[in-house]
Image (tube, helix red, strand yellow):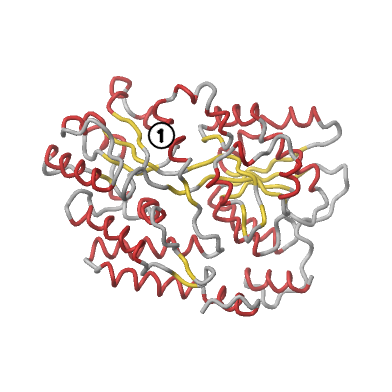
Amino acid sequence: MKGREETRRTALGLVAAAPLAACAGQRGPNAPLRFWAMGREGEVVQRLIPAFEAANPGLRVEVQQLPWSAAHAKLLTAFAGGDLPDLCQVGNTWLPEFAALGALEPLDARVAASAIVRPADGFEGVWRTNTVDGVLCGVPWYVDTRLLFYRRDLLEKAGHGAAPATWAQWLDAMEAVKSLVGKGAWAALLPLNEPEPLLTLALQQSDPLLRDGGGRGNFQSAGFKRALGFYGDIFRRGLAPPSSSTEIGNLYDEFDRGAFCFYVTGPWNLGEFRRRLPAARQDIWMTAPMPGPDGPGAGIAGGASLVVFQGGGRADPAWRLIEHLATFQAQSRFCALTGDLPARRDVWRGAPLASDLEAAAFRDQLTRVRPTPQVPEWERITLEMQLVAEQMVRGGLPVDAATQEMDRRADGLLEKRRWMLAREGKSAT
C-alpha cells in the first residue's frame, strides 16, 4: 500500500502525515450503509430509500446530505482520515481526482453482469466521463449539458424563423437581433465569469484541450484558437455585453424585457424560466441545441455520478443501492422530484419528458456531448481559461497572446502531473 500512501500525501499536501487508515473504515455487516449526496439531490433521494430497504431486509441506509460548496473538501478530509462513506454522489469532473487517489471501486465487472445498469441505455458521451484510464469508476445518476435558451419572438421579428444550427447562422441571427433591439439591449448574454460557453465552443473542435498525456495545455492549437476567436468576435461586434453575471440585475426580468435574445445555460433553467416568467409570456422562449462550426455542435458532458469507495467492505450492498437508483422507476421519480435530467434514455420516452418541447433540445444535445480532460487539475485549469478569456474581452488581449497565457497557466498547474507521468515512464515532454 506504499504507493497509495504516497499518492494521498502528494494530492492532499500531507507530506508529514502518519500512515493513513483505509479509504473507508471497516464496519460490521449489520451497520447502516453510508451514502453521501449533495444539495437538493441529497434531500430527495431519501424518499427512494424505503423501497430499497424493503427489498433488502436487514439492510439500512444512512443518507448524509452535503452542500455542494463544502462537499469536495469534506470528501478529501474523509479520504485522509479513512472515513469515506460506502457510496457517494460526485460531480463528473471530480472522478479523475478520486481515481488518481485510488479511492474508487472499479465497476466494469459489476456493470457487465448487471441487468439494470447498461451503458447502451444512456448517453455515450456521459458514460465516457465515468471511465478514467480505461477503468469504469462511476455510474451516471443524472445528466447535464449547456445549450441555447432564446427569445423566439425576437428572433422571428429579426427575420429568422428557426434557431441557428451553425456558427455563421448564429452570428447572422445575432446581428439581426442587435439591429432590431438597438442601443441598450444585446443579442446574447455570455457572462464572463461563466466558463461553460467558451468551453462548449472548444469541445466542438477536434483538437484536444490538453496534450502529452494530459501533461500540458493545448490552447494554442488551431481548433481552440478558432473557438476563442469566435467567442471573442461576439463581444468585439457588440453583440454581447462584456460583463459578469454579478453585474446583471434579475436575469429573468432582463430576458423578459428583451435585454438579450440568446443565453447559453443548463437544464435547471427550464424550471426557473417557467416559474419566473409570467404565465402569459411563456410562449416567448424556446431552447435549441448549440450551433457548431458546420452544423449542430457538441456540448459539455456534465451531471453527477454514483461511485463506490474502496476499503469499507460494503461494495456489494453499495452496488445494490446503485442498481436500485438506476431502475426506470427510481430514475423517473427522482427526476420528477428534482427537475434533473435522467441518465436513462427510456425515461425520456415516457411522460412527462416525451411531451416537453423545451426539454427536447437537451435530449438532442446529450447525444453529442464530449467529456472534458480527465485530469484532477481540470477544474482549476478551466478557471484560469475563463480568467484569461475575460482579460481578452475586457482588455483587448490578442487571441495568440491569450492562448499562450492559457497554456502557461495550465502547464504550471500540470507540473506535478508531468513529474508523476515521467516517474511512471509515461513522459509528457
Q: Is residue 355 left or right of residue 1?
A: left
Kindly identify the amino acid type of the residue bearing the numbered disc 1.
Answer: Ala
Q: Quadrant of residue 421?
A: bottom right
Q: Residue at x 65, y 49 (%)?
A: 138
**Viewer-nearest residue: 260 or 17:** 260
> Does residue 153 lie above or below 38 as drawn?
above
**Percent from the top left, x then y, of residue 118?**
66, 39
Q: Residue at x 17, y 39 (%)?
A: 177
Residue that extends furthest to the front in the rendered view of this protein: 294
Q: Quadrant of residue 357?
A: top left
Please give the count of numbered marks on the rendered protein.
1
**Percent from the top left, x then y, of residue 169?**
24, 43
**Percent from the top left, x then y, of residue 64?**
67, 43
Q: Is residue 416 left or right of residue 216?
A: right
Q: Give the class, few, some or many, for how many residues have Cα within 10 Å of label 1's Cα (few <14, many ≥20).
A: some
User: What residue is disc 1 on?
Assistant: 361
**Percent from the top left, x then y, of residue 224?**
36, 62
> Does residue 293 lie above or below 13 as drawn?
above
